[in-house]
Amino acid sequence: MKIAYCILCHKVTNPLRFTVNYLSRFEGNRIYIHVDRKSDIAPFEEAFEQANVTWLTERIDVAWGSVSQVDATLALLKAATQETFDYVFLISGDDIPIASHDQILACLERHKGREFIAYQDERFNRVDPCERVKYHYTDMFFKKRKTLMERVGAKLHGVGCRLGFFNNPFYKTLPRLYKGTSWFTISHGASCFILKYLEDYPYYRLAYQYSFCCDEVFFHTILKQSPFNRNIIRDPECYSDSLRYIDWKTGPDYPRTLDESDFANMKSSGMLFARKVDPDIDIGSLECFIDKTNEHYKESLFV
């Protein structure tokens, strides 16, 4: 089985070093890396010289919460679909594999043809996807740390939206919207369908130009109305349909920044990847962890 691992990142971290070094060991894997245009790419090229690592030359200036995250993902999908892979994983530089390469292959073989992209359901605190796209959001929304004036501005923007201002004129051209988690594992066919859909309906991308956190809506909506919808995994008993372990409950930050103390929960989750991981986590502990993943790993995933 051939797998493309598409990575969005902006700095060289220990999780990124471990993930790329581990996944690049295997012949059927290829790693595609998009480095934020604001970052110097030289440290990345020095850190990773493997033959099966490809650097994207089309680099996007990525801002948290903006459509630039979608554009960077699309650049990765375009690069990956130049070859034929069985599956494409979208991960970040904060992710690590928590299953061995053999376990990843075994899971995908058991469920070959299925799509692993999580849609919000009873496992989520529901968010209306229309609110993400219906209005025109300004640059202040794309900052994780806002000044006092920006926080006031965001409140006033919300009032304006309720009064009928800041409407997105392209919103009404869109199909019914669906929301889920940003990170997914989809087939080569589904990846190609997304890119072909955008060629056929260029207005779709335009409608998201001033949206907020649209990476949680953009791809989910396309696949929901595609022939691949019937192949999307949905198992309410499973930790996550996207095969990612993400701790939104424990804190103190949300999602929790994972470290060695989370290894047992990662293992028992039955997921394939975990995020987001402490950027300074000891690489030796990660190597020891992946060597022991056969212990306590759930083989009953999506039975």
Image: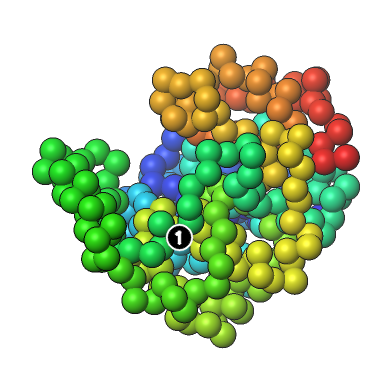
Outermost front residue: 163
Whether residue 2 sits left or right of residue 201 in the image: it is right
Counting from the top left corner in percent of width and height, residue 232 is at 74, 56
Give, as a three-letter code, the residue at label 1. Answer: Cys
Whether residue 70 sits left or right of residue 54 in the image: it is left
Q: Residue at x 57, y 59 (%)?
A: 178
Q: Residue at x 34, y 76 (%)?
A: 169
Outermost top residue: 261
The number of numbered discs placed on residues in the rendered structure image is 1
Decide: is 147 above or below 249.
Answer: below
Color theme of the render: rainbow
Viewer-side residue, 86 vs 119: 119
Counting from the top left corner in percent of width and height, residue 40 is at 32, 51
Outermost left residue: 149
Counting from the top left corner in percent of width and height, residue 132 is at 41, 57
Dot 1 alpha-carbon crowd within 10 angstroms: few under 14, some 14 to 19, many 20 or more = some
Counting from the top left corner in percent of width and height, residue 62 is at 35, 56
Q: Residue at x 70, y 51 (%)?
A: 116
| Residue 223 visible in the snapshot | yes
| Residue 73 visible in the snapshot | no
Q: Which residue is drawn at 52% across and 25% down?
A: 249
Quick one: SS at disc 1? helix
Whether residue 251 sits left or right of residue 271 in the image: it is left
Q: Which image quadrant: the N terminus? A: bottom right
* Residue under label 1: 130
